[in-house]
Image (cartoon, rainbow, N blue to C red):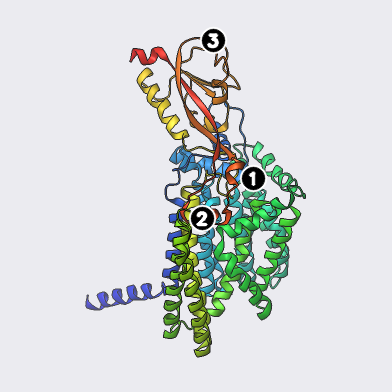
Amino acid sequence: MVDLAKSEREAGATAVAGLHLTLADGLFLLVGAAAALLRLANLGRLPLSPAEAEAALGVWRFWQAGEQAIVVPSPAYFSLTAVLSQVLGFSDGVMRLVPALAGVALALLPWLLRRRLGEVGALAAAWLLAISPLATAVSRTASGDSLALFALFLLLVAWLRYQDEGGGWLHLAGGALALGVSSAPLFYGGLLALLPLLLSQRARWPQKGEWRETAVVTLVLFVALSTLLLGHLPGAGSAAALLGQWLQLFGFSGGLAALFNPILALGRYEVLPLLLGVPALLWAVWREDAPATQAALWLGGLALLLLLQWGNLTLVPLLLLPGSLLIGRLAAAVLVALDDGLTWLFSLALALLGGLMLVNVARFVRVVAYNLENNLENIWLALFAFAVTAVTIYFFWAWAQTPTYQAILLTALLLLSFYQWGTAWWLGHAAANDVRERWVQTPATDDDLPMLIRLVRQISAQVTGSEKEIDLVGGVDTAVLRWYLREFTNASFGQSVPPGTQASLILTTQEAASQANGPAFGSNYFGGDFGLLRTGIAPDSLLTPTPVLDALRWWLFHESRAVVQEQRVVLWIRADLVERE
């Protein structure tokens, strides 16, 4: 018995030792947790945008008897969400769950390249993707773009691992290709820029049998993803149409504003990759590091594509993929032998000085609009901290060069990550429908809409005893209203309200309600207005004497003088319903 217990303890110790858990593994788990928190928390908090509502309606209508008009913007998104909805229901959060999970998986993929990037490089690349504001925003949007980003990066990872190891990685690459071509037009742009990198990796070229097996796997997965396991055959045509949609993006319209829009978006949201990506690019050229050079070529191909598609803003998240690999290789080269105490001492000093600059600049931006003369002291303190920082770096470099380089990179990662995290949380959780954000496309759904839907449900419950059986006539027809009123079986929609209507509830646009004669209803009604869509920003509100400070105040404190233009609707309630109550 004693020997048996001893052997069991030794076997357990061997099993634990076989896990090979390291500090890098623990840090990688934290990166994954950060990515999941940004993408999965409060996933249904904000209402769906018009484009999201269109995609969600396609999923819901597929499962309804007698529904024919099914729009499928992304076949892969449609198929995966349609299956998931049968388990979790049709809430806003469920409609965004598949892209969110793809976004979390995207942040984890660099770990599979740690043999090429190094553990530090893989961690740095994963961290950049995890806290990226644009990657977070795409992941929290009900569309196929997040699936396209994941499929593209998975294709690269699987192909590189096949070059190193062979085996089933080629089949995984075929699966990634099937997912990509059935997800979004975005995939084709990334694939075009990635092809030179893929073709340059020919250490192991597949045999005919491997090509044949991979083709079968790719075809089967493509059919399954695009047609919902043959349950929706028109999805194959929708998948084929994605290529045509991508080709239509080529052109040179929009002027210089459209061309500079992606650059301005990078400067607004991706400060960390932008500031560290430039030195990483120079380092890749100087050192001729193979993985970094390949990532730089991929980045150059995407930059060229931005010109050919004249500033296509949806391509900007693609830049994060090679950018993260570039910065990861730079981090792996610089952050070696971090057990040197000088590195941590230098990092602490630079972090304190950097924090001093950040606080004073933020304080100046916060109060300068109210009192300019008495707040220049913050600018002077920031300039003083900058001068002290420059002198400190010079003396550190003269003392020990390697710890100085490491301290500069660590401090930049720390301070810029603080900004990236806050911006990612704001964009993904609070501002996804705020047209004052450069990334948000118009029209966007107004935050008043959930209040409108709750009011309709309350009135329905009081009048009919059910939250979804009241009769409602809509004189405004949008995908957003159809999505949020989808369960109201007695609701009808059109571009106007028929004269003499006596429905319990009527929805009209505010413009129709404010006409000279007012709406012609068949009974007495009273109503209240609600925001439906945000359609843009009033141009006059952008003409301010301090545009730079206004932009910084919006970035740091989310305060803006811009006036949002709205499309508002009026909910009319038949007067006798209230009198009866």
- Disc 2, SS: helix
Mark 3 or mark 2, which has the lower sequence index? 3
Residue type for callout 2:
Trp
Numbered label attached to residue 555: 2
Label 3 – label 1 distance at C-alpha: 50 Å
Question: Up-down: is 187 above or below 458?
Answer: below
- x and y percentages locating residue 148 in the rendered image: 61, 52
Q: Nearer the viewer, mark 1 or mark 2?
A: 2
Say which residue label 1 marks. 223
- x and y percentages locating residue 109 in the rendered image: 54, 63
Q: Circles 1 and 2: CB distance less than 8 Å?
A: no
Q: Nearer the viewer, mark 3 or mark 2?
A: 2
The extreme bottom residue here reads: 399
- x and y percentages locating residue 516 in the rendered image: 57, 17
- Disc 1, SS: helix
> Which quarter of the figure is the C terminus placed in?
top left
- x and y percentages locating residue 488 in the rendered image: 47, 24
For residue 476, what is the image quadrant?
top right
Q: Tell me which residue sits at (67%, 73%) in the image.
A: 293
Say which residue label 3 marks. 500
- Foreground residue among 516 and 215: 516
For residue 142, what is the image quadrant?
top right
Mark 1 or mark 2, which has the lower sequence index? 1
Q: Circles 3 and 2: CB distance less than 8 Å?
A: no
Residue type for callout 3:
Gly
Residue type for callout 1:
Val
Position of 130 compared to 312: left or right?
A: left
Label 3 – label 2 distance at C-alpha: 50 Å
- Foreground residue among 246 and 553: 553
Label 1 – label 2 distance at C-alpha: 44 Å
- Foreground residue among 412 and 457: 412
